[in-house]
């Protein structure tokens, strides 16, 4: 029972971090109809910005300043580069974001080097939140869960309960009508892209000190984020939330189970943990190409 509850809590925590990271990618796809291959790179930028700001003014100001900085950079990229690529078609925009990911990684190498930076959990959030049997649950993991759930509620309220959310959703399906009503549709898309990458930046600030802040962190999570978005359904925030939790819990339980697979003497369930999300994605694509909650074909 102790192993089950501990693995469940760790899986939910990891799943909620995945949701923080994938929600921005889902938002950009649902509103702009594009896949941003550089999304995980903005997560990495958020972690490094969080590290720099937290060393100057503290961790809590970094929670606001770093995502805003990432969002501004994203908005400027959309305005002065990505918009031109998008006008030339989907292939051009995909190649642009693919190249952008490499560019951001090289910039990180130049500024912070190739070794991890000492980005640590703040002292006020370092320690046990409660004890479960003989295992302790850290305060910081509880903080991560709180921020993730708060972000989901805020996003849902923004998109479904405000005039801004109504305009954003209308700009996706009826851009000509929205423009005729006096709204600047290109500016709306710029704000959506900036907001989406700002969410990735927030995930970087939160996750950077929980794991390791180093130049390879974008590549480490980039593929798993796309798995979350595809399994949940392209463009579905609810689907991304469900898929994030499912993959987080699945991987955490697999890592915890040291059980040999019958017929494969050297192979254990824990060794299969990195493969399971991709296996789940393949099965979902076979059974339901739209994903769990998606409305578009993948």
Image (spheres, rainbow, N blue to C red):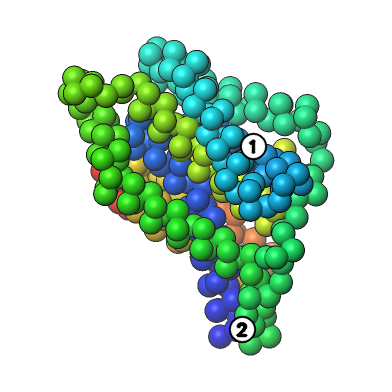
Q: Quadrant of residue 183?
A: top left
Q: Is residue 99 left or right of residue 280?
A: right
The residue singled out by tag 2 in the image is: 132
The relative height of residue 142 versus residue 164 in the rendered view (above or below) is below
In space, the residues marked 1 and 2 are separated at their CA atoms by 35 Å
Query: Disc 1 or disc 2, which is closer to the eye?
Result: 1
Q: Quadrant of residue 112?
A: top right
Pointer 1: residues within 10 angstroms few (<14), some, or many (20+)? Answer: many
Quadrant showing the C terminus: top left
Q: Is residue 98 left or right of residue 190?
A: right
Q: Nearer the viewer, residue 82 or 281?
A: 82
Residue that appears at 54% across and 55% down? 17
Is residue 248 at least partly visible in the picture? no
Residue that appears at 18% across and 19% down? 180
Is residue 54 at least partly visible in the picture? yes
Residue that appears at 67% across and 39% down? 49
Residue 2 in percent (x, y) is at 60, 84
Residue that appears at 44% across and 13% down? 84
Q: Which badge, 1 or 2, is on the more N-terminal residue?
A: 1
The relative height of residue 123 versus residue 28 in the rendered view (above or below) is below
Residue 222 in percent (x, y) is at 57, 41
Q: Nearer the viewer, residue 201 or 294?
A: 201
Disc 1 + disc 2, Cβ < 8 Å: no
Q: Quadrant of residue 108?
A: top right
Residue 36 in percent (x, y) is at 48, 31
The residue singled out by tag 1 in the image is: 45
Residue 296 in percent (x, y) is at 28, 39
Pointer 2: residues within 10 angstroms few (<14), some, or many (20+)? Answer: few
In what element is the residue under mark 1?
A: helix
């Amino acid at each position: 029972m102790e192993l089950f509850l501990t693995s469940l809590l760790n899986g939910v925590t990891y799943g909620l971090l995945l949701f923080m990271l994938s929600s921005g990618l889902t938002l950009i796809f649902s509103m702009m109809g594009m896949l941003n291959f550089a999304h995980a790179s903005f997560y990495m930028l958020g972690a490094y910005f969080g590290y720099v700001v937290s060393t100057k003014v503290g961790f809590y100001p970094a929670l606001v300043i770093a995502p805003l900085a990432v969002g501004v950079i994203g908005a400027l990229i959309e305005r002065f580069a990505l918009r031109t690529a998008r006008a030339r078609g989907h292939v051009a925009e995909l190649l642009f974001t693919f190249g952008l990911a490499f560019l951001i990684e090289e910039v990180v190498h130049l500024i912070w080097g190739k070794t991890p930076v000492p980005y640590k959990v703040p002292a006020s959030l370092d320690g046990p939140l409660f004890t479960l049997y003989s295992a302790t649950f850290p305060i910081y993991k509880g903080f991560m869960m709180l921020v993730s759930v708060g972000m989901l509620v805020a996003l849902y309220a923004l998109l479904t309960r405000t005039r801004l959310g109504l305009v954003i959703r209308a700009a996706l399906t009826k851009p000509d009508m929205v423009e005729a009503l006096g709204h600047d549709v290109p500016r709306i898309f710029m704000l959506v892209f900036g907001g989406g990458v700002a969410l990735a930046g927030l995930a970087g600030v939160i996750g950077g000190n929980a794991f390791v802040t180093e130049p390879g962190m974008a590549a480490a999570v980039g593929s798993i984020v796309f798995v979350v978005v595809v399994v949940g359904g392209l463009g579905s925030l609810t689907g991304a939330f469900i898929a994030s939790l499912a993959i987080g819990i699945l991987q955490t339980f697999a890592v915890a189970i040291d059980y040999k697979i019958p017929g494969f003497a050297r192979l254990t369930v824990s060794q299969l943990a990195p493969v399971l999300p991709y296996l789940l994605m393949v099965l979902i694509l076979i059974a339901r190409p739209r994903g769990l909650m998606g409305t578009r074909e993948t």
